[in-house]
Amino acid sequence: MNKPIYLDHASTTPVDPRVLTAMQPYFSKIYANPSSIHDAGRKAREAVDKTRTAVAKILRCLPEEIIFTSGGTESINLAIKGIAFTRGKGQIITSAIEHPAVLETCKYLETKGFVVTYLPVDKYGLISPADVIRAICKDTILISVMYANNEIGTIQPLAEIGAIAKKHQILFHSDACQAGTLDLDVAKMKVDLLTLNSSKIYGPKGVGLLYVRKGIALEPLLHGGKQESGFRSGTENVPGIVGFAKALELAQKEKLQENKRLTSLRDHFIQAVLAKISNTHLNCQPSQCLPGIINISFAGVEAESVVRYLSQHGIYISSGSACSSQQIETSHVLKAMSLSKKWAGGSLRFSLGRATTKKDLNQVILILEKIIQSLRRIS
């Protein structure tokens, strides 16, 4: 059997060895509670403070505007619920293709009396700023739109949406968990709150952050020792925070070269698949998409079957659907894009990473072609 080929980086990434090296001292050498006032605690606090400053430099914000959390889901909940509970009532505007962490939070808030407007998207998952303007009303308290989609890779026009929010004096949050290799200047994006996740950028799992512009009132989700300026109680995960910062530093430092490499690989893969396998449909627009995410539909097959057969060959990808109660449910993202059943059921996501090579992709194409042909004959 050939070496495994991992093409599910949008789900999670391996920890970069350089990140692991940076984390190691904080497991058993500098291990004290950062809130302790003795010298051992002070050393741990210095590590967290140094890390916060380094992250703030990347986001072009103040260190005190960074809140470290347990990951993207917590950061999203803190941002949306934090604003909602501070205001008490009002309308929230989001999109129909957000991550479940956003959508489920909004659904919960609807049970508490908040009004949520879900913006439509075009066939490539792109939001129209004009729709944002139309959705705004006198009771709008927050707009939450993701930077880049986790299933199809579409990059949204954040600066344009942010300008609209600012003009109407509405707070603007963005889930940027998939956008760690894009420009993260919060001023350029015109965001008031921004979510990032470590595990998508070769950092440790269980660590994330929320940028909150200074002066914004936010109701905390957790109460206790008032760590993270009172926004997020609980002893800080020092090794995780250090690892996250190192991963973010590397992702930003190497983004131009790596994005160029991934774009070339992505375009090669798309062209080859569309040329070799008939009855296929590209669900992403490369010019408006993350370099490493490819979403393609194959007519006449069930995506879950393709995923399982590829896994038997040591090739790991994701499908655009989820099995529930023995039924295949089309992804909410594909539904929002009005993708027909012919294409939606056979939607696959290939997400490339640092270890991905052209040789790997050629091997995947060879095996994928055989699997698709075999499944079509059976069906």
Image (cartoon, rainbow, N blue to C red):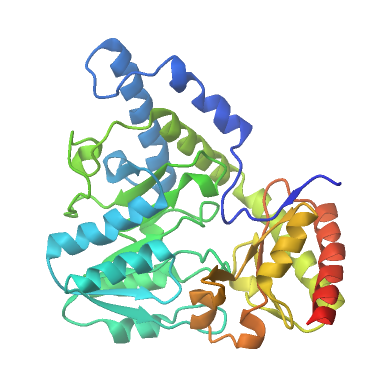
Viewed as shown, does residue 52 lie left or right of 82?
right
Q: Locate the C terminus and report the quarter of the image it occupies.
A: bottom right
Residue ID at (25%, 38%): 228
Kindly identify the residue that appears in the image at 38 percent across and 85 percent down.
Answer: 130
Write the residue at 44% across / 28% down: 239
Looking at the image, residue 121 sits to the left or right of residue 362; the answer is: left
* x and y percentages locating residue 196 in the rendered image: 43, 51
Specify the farthest residue to the front.
326
Q: Nearer the viewer, residue 174 or 319?
A: 319
Residue 295 in view in this figure: no
Depicted 352 relative to depicted 110: above or below:
above
* Residue that sits furthest to the top in the current view: 39
Task: Give coordinates of residue 63: x percent, y percent.
Answer: 31, 39
Residue found farthest to the left = 88
- Quadrant in the rendering for residue 238: top left
Q: Is residue 38 above or below residue 254?
A: above
Where residue 26 appears, as percent x and y from the top left, is 44, 22
Please determine whether, in this image, residue 52 is positioned above or below residue 311. above
- In this view of the protein, which residue sits in the foreground, 124 or 102? 102
Q: Residue at x 41, y 52 (%)?
A: 72
